[in-house]
Image: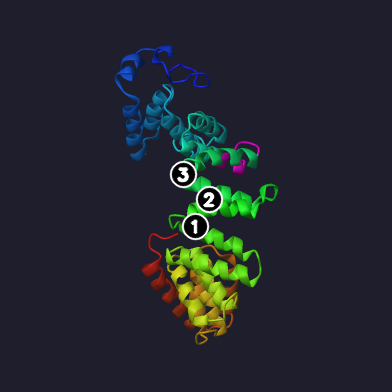
Amino acid sequence: MLSKNLNTYSGENDSDIHWSKPELNLAKAKSLTEMNEDGLTAYEMLDYAGAMESWLAAAERGSAQAQYKIGILYDFGEGVEQDYMQAAKWYRLAADQGLSNAQYFLGRIYANGYGVTQDFDEAVRWYSLAAKQGYKNAIMNLGKIHAEDLAHQDYAESMKWYRLAAQDQYAPAQFSIGEIHMRQNNMQGYQQALKWYFLAAENGYAPAQFSLGEMFANGIGVVKDYPTALKWYHLAAQQANPYALASIGRLYEEGRGVPQDFALAHMWFNLSTAKGFNFAQTERDNLAQKMPPTQIAEAQAIARDYAQNYFNNKT
């Protein structure tokens, strides 16, 4: 392994490295670009040891990309034991060189307290640096911190970041703007939420589609309209949204906007349960007590058919 101390090496002068043989000729013969590409090729072939070897060689010559990618290996435990402190070390080396990816992931380390004391001030600092370079996830996380963290809660600041992210029709940002408007708990807020949910829903964002379903099913800011609610629930359900699946089940169980049908209600609750929604499992099991075995078998068969048609490759 190369012996140069990464904490002090600037990457400006390869002659500063104390090369050992046979590394000297091999490392000197390759450019940083080639080393990074070799690492990426190995990584894509799941050869994490090979990726680490190539990226370490590049990192010790000051490559921010290689330093960042080594951080990823440690962050997600790919080819090495997961070690957030090591991940933070490598991210910082790359982040200090201005690499937005590394700045974002270092912010994520601090925001979640992975291997470090949770520190939203540090998270905001690194996210802000990445956001200045247009890094979308950093922009979104700044909006989230200012919306949800009590020490930093500032809805105007949160809205600023979400609107920045929403400028190119980014659906998660549009949805988040809608969520902030919903917190106003008044008609003006509901109308604005409806507008932004609709924009995100039209862009195919399942959480927004579900939220529109909820607004129309419960008459929040709009006249109660079960057919419209069902339309939006179905669009979200086709993306395996567990809450939409359960909501359709509830409509069929209670006969709201559709004929009451326990078999279909059981089917939708069953699909939602399969996606991890525990409330739906309780609803399904309670409903099953009212159903004969033949009807339950019918519901299970319908659920299997629906899952095969819509859930392939969806989480």
Question: Where is residue 63, by image quadrant?
Answer: top left
Question: Where is residue 177, by image quadrant?
Answer: bottom right
In the rendered view, tell whether residue 95 sits above or below residue 258. Answer: above
The answer to whether residue 177 is seen in the rendering is yes
* Quarter of the image with the N terminus in it: top left
Which mark is on residue 172? 1
Q: Nearer the viewer, residue 63 or 128?
A: 128
The numbered mark, 1 or 3, whose residue comes first in the sequence reads: 3
The answer to whether residue 114 is seen in the rendering is no
Q: x, y percentage for residue 228?
A: 49, 79
The numbered mark, 1 or 2, whose residue comes first in the sequence reads: 2
Which residue is tagged 3? 134
Q: Amino acid at mark 3?
A: Gly
Other-residue count near label 1 (Cα within 10 Å), few / some / many at <14 / 14–19 / ≥20: many
Magenta residues?
A: 107-117
User: How many circles with numbers are drawn on the protein?
Assistant: 3
Q: Secondary structure at mark 1?
A: helix
